[in-house]
C-alpha cells in the first residue's frame, strides 16, 4: 500500500476570496496594483517589439520602452506601499 506524503497543510477557504488573497499575501488594492503593473509591462514589451530601422528613432523609442518597463517593475514591487500612503488618511 502506498504511503502518501503531505505537501502542504490544509487551509480553510470558507471565507472566499478574502481567505485566498490572505494566503498569497495580497489585498484587493495590492492585486489591482499588480494588475496595473502587468498591463504597463505588456505595453512596454510591445513598444520594444515595434522598434523602427531608423537608428535615432529606434534609440528614442527603445529608451522610452525601457523607461516604461522600469516604471512597471517599480510599481509591481512597491506599488502597494506607495498607494497605501494615499488611502490611509489621518484626521
Image: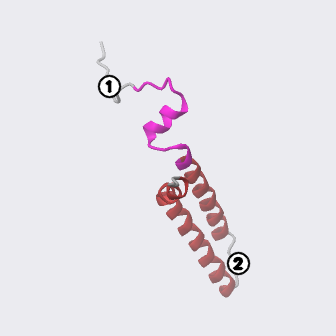
Q: In which image quadrant can residue 72 be found?
A: bottom right
Residue that label 1 marks: 6
How packed mark 2 is, by other alpha carbons closer than 10 Å (few <14, some 14-19, many 20 or more), is few
49 versus 79 height, above or below: below
The residue stretch that appears in magenta? 11-30
9 sits left or right of 76 in the view: left
27 versus 40 height, above or below: above
What is the spatial separation of the Cα atoms under label 2 and label 1, in whole angstroms? 54 Å
Give the residue drawn at x 63%, y 56%.
39
Do residues under tags 2 and 1 come within 8 Å of each other at their CB atoms? no
Q: Earlier in the sequence, mark 2 or mark 1?
A: 1
Q: 60 or 77, which is in the foreground?
A: 77
Image coords of residue 85 (percent x, y): 50, 58
42 versus 25 height, above or below: below
Image coords of residue 45 (percent x, y): 62, 64
Q: In which image quadrant can residue 50 be found?
A: bottom right
Residue at the far bottom in the pictured view: 56
91 sits left or right of 62 in the view: left
30 sits left or right of 53 in the view: left
Q: How many marks?
A: 2
Residue at the far front in the pictured view: 91
Q: 6 or 39, which is in the foreground?
A: 39
Residue 52's disc is: 2
Q: 53 or 24, which is in the foreground?
A: 24
Give the residue drawn at x 66%, y 64%.
46
Circle nearer the viewer, 2 or 1: 1
For the N terminus, the quadrant is: top left
Residue 14 inside the magenta-drawn segment: yes
Q: Secondary structure at mark 2?
A: loop
Amino acid at each position: 500500500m502506498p504511503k502518501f506524503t503531505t505537501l502542504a497543510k490544509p487551509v480553510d477557504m470558507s471565507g472566499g476570496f478574502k481567505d485566498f488573497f490572505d494566503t498569497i499575501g495580497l489585498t484587493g488594492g495590492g492585486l489591482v496594483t499588480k494588475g496595473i503593473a502587468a498591463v504597463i509591462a505588456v505595453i512596454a514589451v510591445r513598444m520594444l517589439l515595434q522598434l523602427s530601422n531608423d537608428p535615432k528613432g529606434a534609440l528614442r523609442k527603445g529608451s522610452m520602452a525601457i523607461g516604461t518597463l522600469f516604471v512597471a517593475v517599480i510599481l509591481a514591487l512597491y506599488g502597494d506601499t506607495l498607494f497605501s500612503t494615499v488611502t490611509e488618511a489621518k484626521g
